[in-house]
Amino acid sequence: MSGRHELKADILIIGGGIVGCATALHLAKRGKSVILLERDQSGMRASGVNFGGVRQHGRAAAELPLSRRARGIWGSLRNLIGIDGDFIQTGHLRLARKPEDIDLLRAHRETAAEFGLRLDFLEQAELREQYPWLSDAALAATYCAEDGHANPRLVAPAFAAAAQAHGADLHEFTDVTEGWYANGEFHLRIKDGRHFAAPVLVNAAGAWAATIAGWFDETVTLVPEIPQVLVTEPTAYRIKPVIGVIGGDLYLRQTLRGNILFGGGEGRANEGFTRSRPLPETTRRATEMAMRLVPMMAPLPVIRSWTGVDGDTPDGSPIIGSSETHPGLFHAFGFCGHGFQLGPAVGAVLSELIIDGKSETPIDGLTIGRFRPKPMTAVDAEAESPVEPATDPTLEPVVEPAAEPAPEADSAVSDAGSD
Ligand SMILES: Cc1cc2nc3c(=O)[nH]c(=O)nc-3n(C[C@H](O)[C@H](O)[C@H](O)COP(=O)(O)OP(=O)(O)OC[C@H]3O[C@@H](n4cnc5c(N)ncnc54)[C@H](O)[C@@H]3O)c2cc1C
């Protein structure tokens, strides 16, 4: 299957979102030859259309070391990519709207503290005093002073430009349609017939990454998520912190220009998830929820809404690290609607895994192996009943429903959805 004009590098990357571009930059900075292949333009997909939330608050324990490292990079982004990406540290408030949510806030506060992340607990009276624009629907909150927001339109393209400045070779409008492994190299065929090969391949293909994993016999469940974001006309700047809620079904922030961005719920996409659009019922529901928490939004017209596509894993956290089927293949996808904040650190960690074989940032809870069935123990085997056909073999095969998500260390207290 080999093509006539093979283009070679040390490392191939599929996907020019924030993850692929950050990886290209970190690898190129360490002298590796890198070719990045992007179907559209860099940062056009989830990385360029997201809500812009840069939060550690509300993350699962498995993500916190990576998220902590990412926060360090966000604070000095200009040194890395030449711009600050409009990142501002505004703080992030995570609200409880039901009495039982308050326990979840406290539990997450303890988890976060184990990773050195300080969260302050605010009773309702304190909330009302400090944030008078919040309604009584907010019963309590935790506040993370380190979090903030940035401009997604700027960040991934700046990572792409910085990677190019360090020698990475970016091929945009380059749709990878086929991949295979032969003679110690990963081979990729492009829709226009070009052919690329390298001993290392990074799968940073966002919502489409399961297809690429499948080319290399790595099966993974990745469900497209289509978060919908809305924006109002500008109004007086009052809402400094980014707002999130337990469960993650509403998020809200105000830009310095005055527009209020908010999201919650999903839009709709075409079959290949290459085009998506907002749904009126999501607009209505998200607007009602937002007004219930922030009544001053009631007179503000929504001037635009949009969607993007990310990939959801069964446990709400991304898959990062080495493949289990092919040494030299590395995955970074399944960011479940909250990978913008992580992106800069994912690139750093992947470059370390590829070049040094290890990273200082623990990602044990994020590897693809966590979704593999665990080997049966002797106790399990004994508990199994003698083999009896459970179904009539003459009947049509039954498609098993998807397995329940694997419980995560603190999945009950993390906001797995989009910011
Ligand atoms: C509306 C919305 C709001 C969000 N809000 C937030 C937020 O506030 N905070 C936060 O942290 N996260 C947020 N997220 C999630 C975040 O945007 C994503 O998790 C993150 O951008 C993922 O980055 P990525 O590089 O993996 O994916 P992408 O940006 O999707 O990049 C993957 C790239 O791979 C390319 N590709 C795929 N297949 C191929 C192929 N075969 N050949 C060539 N190229 C290919 C695609 O074209 C795409 O450009 C949000 C997401 C959405 C959609």
Image (spheres, grey):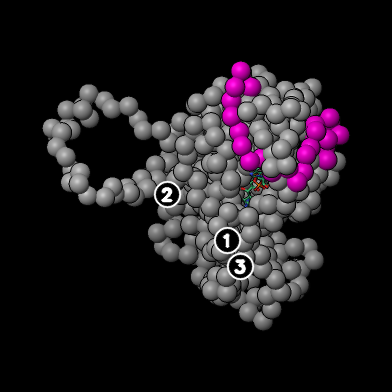
Q: Which residue is mark 3?
A: 278
Badge 1 marks a residue whose secondary structure is strand
Q: Which residue is mark 2?
A: 412
Three-letter code, disc 2? Ala
Relative side of 172 to 121, left or right = right
Q: Which residue is mark 1?
A: 269
Three-letter code, disc 1? Ala
Q: Position of residue 210 (x, y in %)?
A: 53, 41
Crowdedness near tag 2: few (<14), some (14–19) or many (≥20) residues, C-alpha within 10 Å: some
User: Relative to residue 397, is residue 304 depicted above or below?
Assistant: below
Badge 3 marks a residue whose secondary structure is loop
First in sequence: mark 1 vs mark 2: 1
Crowdedness near tag 1: few (<14), some (14–19) or many (≥20) residues, C-alpha within 10 Å: some
**Magenta residue span:** 161-185
First in sequence: mark 3 vs mark 2: 3
Three-letter code, disc 3? Pro
Q: Position of residue 166 (x, y in %)?
A: 84, 30
User: Relative to residue 220, is residue 85 depicted above or below?
Assistant: below
